[in-house]
Image: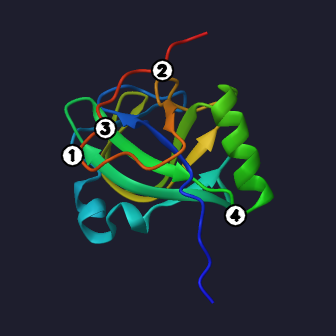
Amino acid sequence: MIVALDAGLTIQGYASLWGVADLNGDVVAKGAFADSLVRTGADGVRMLHQHESRAVVGVWDEMVEDDRGLLVRGRIADWSAEARHARALSRAGALDGLSIGFRAARARRDGRLRVLSGVELWEVSLVTFPMLPGARFRPLADRPAAAGSWAFRPASRR
């Protein structure tokens, strides 16, 4: 039996920003995700809701390290109540934060800050309150964007 899946709500944003301290004192250095992304690609990184491992709410289609940070694009699905809830909140603008789940592979101390130069990325969650306030996403459309057509425009702040 073949089951057609909904294309999902396409979202994009920055999951991490280079050189910006989060509320916990972590700073991610440019290139920190490169090794991890070579190993797993975007499809090896889970899209969760609020870092809850049982709440896989979509899939990440693309992750790119650019001059600003880790740019991500993915689709929030409709395969579960949690996914539909995250999708509705995102569409309404009530959920727009991103947060990374990771293991520090390489890090050093710089005063009170921990500078991460190597990160093993496990998941990028849709969250209400991101640890890095600038890590935000916005909905693009209720269908996947055409290949190569996703230029980031920051979400407006309320």
Judge left or right: residue 7 versus residue 90: left
**Looking at the picture, does residue 54 appear above or below residue 137?**
below
Of all residues, the one furthest to the right in this rendering is: 81
10 Å crowding of disc 1: few (<14), some (14-19), many (20+)? some
At numbered mark 1, what does the secondary structure look like: helix, strand or loop? loop
**Looking at the picture, does residue 94 appear above or below residue 76?**
above
- From the image, which quarter does the N terminus lie in? bottom right
Q: Which mark is residue 150?
A: 3
- Going by the numbered disc 1, the residue's amino acid type is Gly
In whole angstroms, how far apart are the C-alphas of marks 3 and 2? 14 Å
Nearer-N-terminus badge (4/3): 4
10 Å crowding of disc 4: few (<14), some (14-19), many (20+)? some
In whole angstroms, how far apart are the C-alphas of marks 4 and 2? 26 Å
Tell me where residue 28 appears, x and y as whole percent: 33, 38
Which residue occupies 69% across, 28% down? Answer: 92
Q: Nearer the viewer, mark 4 or mark 2?
A: 4
At numbered mark 4, what does the secondary structure look like: helix, strand or loop? loop
At numbered mark 2, what does the secondary structure look like: helix, strand or loop? loop
Nearer-N-terminus badge (3/2): 3
Nearer-N-terminus badge (4/1): 1
Q: Nearer the viewer, mark 4 or mark 1?
A: 4
In whole angstroms, how far apart are the C-alphas of marks 4 and 1? 34 Å
Nearer-N-terminus badge (2/1): 1
The residue that mark 4 highlights is 79
10 Å crowding of disc 3: few (<14), some (14-19), many (20+)? few
- From the image, which quarter does the C terminus lie in? top right
Q: Nearer the viewer, mark 1 or mark 3?
A: 3
The residue that mark 1 highlights is 31
**Looking at the picture, does residue 113 appear above or below residue 50?**
above
The residue that mark 2 highlights is 155
